[in-house]
Amino acid sequence: MLNQNPAFLTNESLIECNEGAKIYSEWEVLTMAYVISDACISCGACEGECPTGAISAGASQYVIDADTCIDCGACEAACPVSAISAG
């Protein structure tokens, strides 16, 4: 199974095909989801900015689903207390 989402990839993982298509193998995928620290004030500003819906309200603060996060950083920029950082 191939992953064709370049948001998860390094330059070394790029393979050019004869047709110019870019293909990436599963073992080359990087997992670098953002994380929300205890500084979260549960304002929800990050949730609305996430293009994949990876952020949801947890028991005491918002949480990011690492499997859904595409590492875009939109949530980090939206956080008023800088509680979000790259994981």
Image (cartoon, helix red, strand yellow):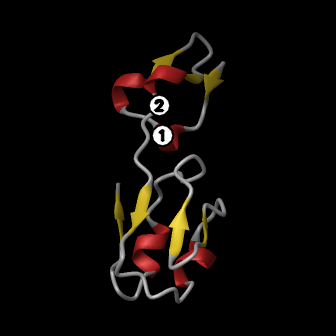
Local crowd size for mark 2, using a 10 Å CA cut-off: few (<14), some (14–19), many (≥20): some
Q: Position of residue 54 (x, y in %)?
A: 61, 61
Residue appearing at x 33%, y 80% in the figure: 82
**Residue at image location 57% in from the left, 46% down from the top:** 67
Which residue carries the number 2 mark? 29
**Dot 1 crowding, Cα within 10 Å, few <14, some 14–19, many 20+:** some
Among numbered discs 2 and 1, the one appearing first in the sequence: 1
Please tell me whether residue 63 is drawn above or below residue 7 in the rendered image.
below
Q: x, y percentage for residue 55? A: 59, 67
Q: Which residue is found at the position 40% from the left and 47% from the top?
A: 32
Q: Nearer the viewer, residue 24 or 39?
A: 39
- Give the residue displayed 63% in from the left and 78% down from the top: 48
Which kind of residue does numbered mark 2 sit on? Val
Q: In the rendered view, does 4 fall on the left or right side of 31? A: right
Q: Amino acid at mark 1?
A: Phe
Q: Are marks 2 and 1 in contact (CB under 8 Å)?
A: yes
Q: Secondary structure at mark 1?
A: helix
Question: As displayed, is residue 62 above or below residue 27?
Answer: below
Where is residue 8? Give x, y as percent.
Answer: 48, 40
Residue 20: % across, % down? 57, 20
Quadrant containing the C terminus in the rendered view: bottom left
* Lateral position of residue 52 relative to residue 77, left or right: right
Q: Residue furthest top?
A: 18
